[in-house]
Image (cartoon, helix red, strand yellow):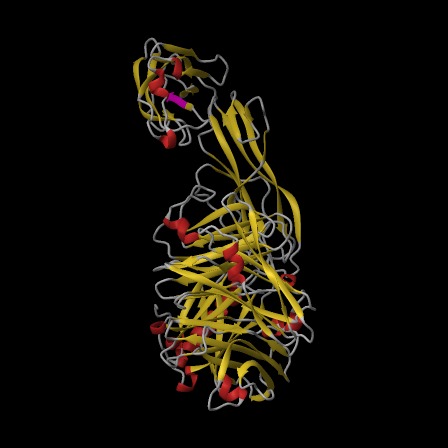
């Protein structure tokens, strides 16, 4: 772990805090964002749009407090504190640590750079704190926008390959009552457990804890007094059940808590581990009154294998209600044909105040799921009123060393359809992004990876009803797979930030999370920090592939949209489908697919328009209101007339004549020429490619022509998706007195595609007057 700050004096810390606080106040003032047309444009052939994006004012910053239940530096453990800032401005955060007894230690402010995540080793951050701060709880405050900052703590025991992770919450917003419930799953009776309970407030709180799932049973709930910000780590049998001599904790069970404080006053967690096998997981607590439906969903439930080990899927449900309930559900995956397939899990009846394991493994085995399927969607429901059942779902390798827990959520409170997550790909770390459609209707989304110096976008993607999409940006990097813009992730990029969002989707339609794991270290963790609002249109522009300046020029135009996230951060642009038109169709024409042709000398503009969606009001406005509008990108062109007359094109004895129209095109039947079969041969998968052959183009130059420019002003080219490849070409037999010449082109057929057009251009100097030019194209035909 790279050291982030060094121990310095309190006076130096105080100066740093004042400086950073001043900086953040300035950075959070209303800032107009520059549009692409206002900033220097470094992208070739990028056109500005006529509609100027208005400056986006920022909402007034508010103070937020995020709380974590527990950290520890004891027993050979390390704790890593991670901050994830999703906004385009640096963010000052103020961590406060509380010892187990509630003693307070205010760490000097830390600055988290814009659009990035930072990890800090708590052993270094707390180097100047007393021994009493070797374990305790953490609170982080910041001035910013809602859900702009995500915070996570990971307690690691590397020698035993153990990890306990926790994503910080805003207690007063997460909980609505003074009741907490959990359900646990142990790998064996030898498992170690630790119950953590923490008071998040400045007032004393009494918590009453009831345990179900031990032998002997707990005779009565135990009352725990917690002073302000006090945290206790308790042994379940000794401290909660009242069995100091020991007993047995069943493989399945649960804990119920009620407390005297306000909602959110108490946070709790249960650590489960078995060091001999490297098993570790966390049993979390939910507020049953905060649920909105009788359902539990999840994304990225792992099945199949991890490395060389088979995974065992485990699902446990606990009925905390007063009447029997029936729990039923299904898993989903996408097959190779793109179809969403469901695996129905038989219903299980659970008595009141009872807990049962659900045999998901049997349902998976009976459905003969293909071996390449490793990620599934998770949808379960129960028959009793909302909040009466709590569930847990995890997958464990046969050795117990690899544990993949799926955080379950109530789809009635699924949150916004957008998020920003840390991406780590150093060593053998893999960070997967999961996006799941929670509805019965198809939806659309965008997903991108932002990294220093660049970005990678999948563009707009479709997601079917109830479909789960798993995106592995590391695999896309390693395979050098091009994104929607044709760009790849550099192989040396190992960290960044994932950004995803639904398109025109209300809250609760799409869910998402990331999962980070290391096979060699045997650890994994999950993260889900939603944006408070989905992405908005920020800018639009058009690009084209070839020069568009002279008569006969042909270029393909593509419209691109750039969004910004809820915090005003511009994201990686992506292609969109546009409606095209030329303002003067006699000068240039453009087809619906975006192919434009310069027809005659004159002035025109090429325009692309498409339907988009943008925020209404300030960036950071929590009302999250949108409006639809037509985005427009436009550029003006002055077309210069062509002067070169292309006459014939030939291969062997086969000759074709160029049309006399302004487009100057010809069609050459290669298959009917001498040795045409050998020129046109192509085998499966590109094998047995054709033999090289010569094509000759005859042309006439305008009067006064005295030279022909070299590349790139004069050229012969074919795009990469064409059937033929240009091996070589040259301008020969040019006679400036008669004004005649030839282009000799060596071609070879390399693939079987529907595209087969050669483009050529000649440009040069006259003895007097302007530069001359001419463009033509040849379509090659093979049977």
Up/down of 518 relative to 558, above or below: below
Q: Residue at x 49, y 52 (%)?
A: 369
Q: Quadrant of residue 383?
A: bottom right
Up/down of 757 relative to 104, above or below: above
Highlighted magenta segment, given as a residue range:
759-764
Residue 468 position within the rendered picture, expressed as x and y whole percent measured from the top left: 54, 53
Residue 198 position within the rendered picture, expressed as x and y whole percent measured from the top left: 53, 81
Q: Residue at x 42, y 54 (%)?
A: 451
282 and 499: which is toward the camera: 282
In the visual, does 272 lie left or right of 256? left
745 and 301: which is toward the camera: 301
**Count the marks: how many?**
0
Up/down of 277 relative to 723, above or below: below
The quarter of the image holding the N terminus is bottom left
The quarter of the image holding the C terminus is top left
The answer, for residue 461, to whether it is visible in the render is yes
Residue 771 position within the rendered picture, expressed as x and y whole percent measured from the top left: 40, 21
In the visual, does 55 lie left or right of 247? right
Residue 78 position within the rendered picture, expressed as x and y whole percent measured from the top left: 38, 75
581 and 515: which is toward the camera: 515
264 and 540: which is toward the camera: 264
The answer, for residue 59, to whether it is visible in the render is no
Up/down of 407 relative to 603, above or below: below
């Amino acid at each position: 772990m790279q050291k982030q700050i060094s121990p310095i004096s309190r006076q130096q810390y105080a100066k740093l805090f004042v400086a950073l606080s001043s900086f953040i106040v300035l950075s959070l003032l209303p800032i107009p964002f520059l549009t692409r047309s206002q900033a220097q444009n470094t992208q070739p052939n990028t056109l500005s749009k006529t509609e100027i994006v208005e400056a986006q004012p920022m909402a007034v910053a508010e103070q937020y407090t995020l709380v974590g239940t527990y950290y520890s530096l004891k027993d050979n453990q390390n704790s890593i504190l991670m901050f994830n800032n999703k906004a385009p401005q640096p963010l000052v955060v103020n961590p406060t640590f509380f010892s187990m007894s509630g003693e307070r230690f205010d760490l000097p402010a830390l600055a988290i750079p814009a659009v990035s995540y930072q990890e800090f080793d708590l052993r270094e951050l707390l180097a100047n704190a007393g021994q009493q701060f070797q374990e305790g709880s953490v609170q982080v405050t910041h001035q910013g926008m809602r859900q702009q900052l995500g915070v996570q703590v990971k307690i690691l025991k590397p020698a035993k390959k153990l990890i306990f992770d926790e994503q910080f919450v805003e207690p007063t917003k997460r909980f609505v009552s003074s009741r907490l419930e959990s359900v646990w799953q142990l790998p064996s009776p030898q498992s170690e457990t630790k119950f953590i309970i923490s008071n998040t407030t400045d007032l004393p709180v009494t918590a009453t804890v009831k345990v179900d799932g031990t032998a002997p049973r707990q005779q009565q709930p135990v009352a725990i007094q917690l002073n302000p910000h006090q945290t206790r780590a308790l042994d379940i049998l000794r401290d909660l059940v009242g069995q100091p001599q020991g007993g047995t904790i069943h493989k399945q069970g649960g804990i119920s808590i009620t407390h005297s404080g306000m909602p959110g006053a108490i946070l709790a967690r249960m650590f489960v581990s078995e060091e001999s096998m490297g098993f570790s997981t966390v049993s979390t607590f939910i507020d049953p009154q905060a649920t909105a439906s009788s359902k539990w969903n999840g994304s990225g439930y792992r099945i199949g294998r991890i490395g060389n080990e088979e995974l065992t899927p485990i699902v446990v449900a606990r009925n905390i209600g007063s009447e029997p309930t029936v729990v039923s559900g299904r898993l989903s995956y996408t097959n190779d044909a793109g179809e969403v397939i469901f695996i129905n899990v038989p219903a299980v009846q659970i008595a009141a105040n009872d807990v049962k394991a659900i045999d998901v493994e049997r349902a998976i085995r009976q459905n003969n799921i293909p071996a390449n399927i490793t990620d599934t969607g998770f949808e379960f429901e129960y028959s009793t009123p909302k909040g009466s059942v709590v569930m847990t779902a995890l997958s464990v390798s046969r050795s117990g060393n690899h544990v993949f827990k799926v955080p379950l959520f109530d789809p009635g409170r699924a949150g916004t359809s957008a998020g920003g997550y840390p991406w780590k790909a150093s060593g053998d770390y893999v960070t997967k992004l999961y996006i799941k459609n929670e509805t019965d209707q198809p939806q659309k989304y965008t997903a991108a990876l932002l990294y220093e110096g660049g970005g990678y976008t999948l563009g707009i993607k479709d997601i079917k009803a109830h479909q789960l999409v798993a995106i592995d940006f590391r695999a896309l990097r390693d395979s050098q797979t091009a994104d929607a813009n044709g760009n790849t992730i550099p192989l040396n990029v190992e960290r960044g930030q994932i950004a995803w969002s639904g398109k025109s989707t209300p809250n609760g339609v799409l869910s998402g999370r990331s999962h980070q794991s290391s096979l060699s270290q045997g650890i994994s963790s999950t993260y889900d920090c939603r944006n408070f609002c989905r992405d908005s249109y920020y800018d639009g522009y058009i690009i084209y592939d070839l020069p568009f300046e002279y008569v006969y020029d042909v270029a393909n135009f593509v419209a691109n949209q750039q969004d910004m996230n809820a915090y005003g951060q511009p994201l990686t642009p992506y292609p969109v489908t546009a409606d095209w038109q030329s303002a003067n169709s006699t000068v240039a024409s453009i087809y619906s697919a975006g192919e434009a042709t310069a027809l005659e000398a004159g002035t025109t503009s090429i325009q692309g328009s498409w339907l988009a969606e943008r925020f209404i009001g300030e960036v950071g406005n929590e009302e999250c209101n949108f409006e639809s509008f037509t985005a427009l990108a436009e550029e003006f062109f002055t077309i210069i007339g062509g002067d070169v007359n292309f006459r014939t094109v030939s291969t062997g004895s086969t000759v074709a004549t160029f049309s006399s129209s302004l487009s100057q095109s010809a069609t050459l039947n290669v298959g009917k020429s001498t040795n045409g079969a050998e020129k046109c041969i192509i085998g499966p998968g590109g094998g047995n490619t054709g033999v090289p052959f010569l094509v000759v183009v005859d042309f006439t130059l305008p009067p006064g022509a005295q030279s022909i420019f070299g590349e790139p002003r004069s050229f012969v080219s074919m795009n990469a998706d064409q059937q033929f490849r240009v091996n070589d070409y040259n301008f020969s037999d040019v006679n400036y007195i008669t004004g005649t010449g030839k282009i000799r082109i060596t071609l070879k057929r390399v693939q079987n595609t529907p595209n087969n057009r050669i483009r050529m251009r000649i440009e040069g100097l006259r003895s007097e007057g302007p530069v001359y030019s001419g463009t033509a194209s040849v379509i090659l035909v093979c049977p």
